[in-house]
Image: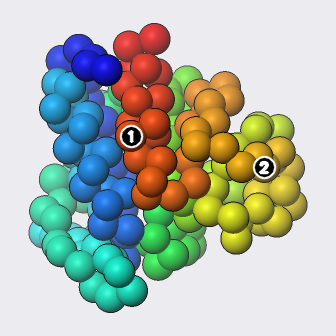
Amino acid sequence: MAHDLNGKRVALLATDGFEQSELQEPKRLLESWGAKVSVVAPGDASQIRGWKDKDWGDSVPVDQSLDGADAASYDALVLPGGVINPDTLRTQAPAVAFIKAFAAAGKPVAAICHGPWLLVESGLAKGRKVTSWPSLKSDLGNAGAQWTDAEVVVDNGVITSRKPDDIPAFSEAVAKALVG
């Protein structure tokens, strides 16, 4: 399904170790529908490196340093998975604050695979129905979320998906939230 996302701005928060397909494919799809997607990363790196098939993958350019990023400049936030990426970001107060700023402004926050670890850390999991990579089920439940095994779950502005196979449905849900 095609969407008209012209004029919509999406922040994609990631660092080294993001699951390559979970950053690149949603970015590609959202851009093909007209959105401007900016890769936001902590530090001053000009690139971050992905994780693909149990080893380091491709690097992608960083469009905006997290230090200079403002949630008010974007319409939605996407959090890709990979084990390393969200595990690193959840220990960084500026990353957690950036996520909370989207939620406080009522803007969509979308997390896929291991990305929902960031929903735990930011408090966004509590009281919501979510999905994720199966190994996060207990973490999300302990954080007060109701975990379900589904391709995509949308609950009060939070969009979650389980794995790379869910990227089309995940990206579609982000697009719907942007136009809805």
Residue 56: quadrant of the picture: bottom left
Q: Is 92 located above or below residue 169 in the figure?
A: below
Q: Are marks 1 and 2 in contact (CB under 8 Å)?
A: no
Q: Secondary structure at mark 2?
A: strand
Q: Residue at x 57, y 54 (%)?
A: 162
* Residue 94 x, y percent position in the rendering: 47, 59
Amino acid at pointer 1: Pro
Q: Is residue 33 above or below residue 129?
A: above
Mark 2 — residue? Answer: 147
CA–CA distance in space, label 1 to label 2: 21 Å
Few, some or many residues within 10 Å of mark 1 (<14, 14–19, 20+): some
Residue drawn at the location 62% of the way across and 62% of the way down: 133
- Is residue 28 visible to the viewer in this orientation of the structure? yes
Quarter holding residue 151: top right
Q: Is residue 169 left or right of residue 127?
A: left
First-in-chain label (1 vs 2): 2
Label drawn at residue 64: none
Q: Amino acid at mark 2?
A: Trp
Whole-percent x and y of residue 95? 47, 58
In the rendered image, the quadrant that contains the C terminus is top left
On the picture, is 93 further left or further right than 117? left
- Mark 1 lies on residue: 168
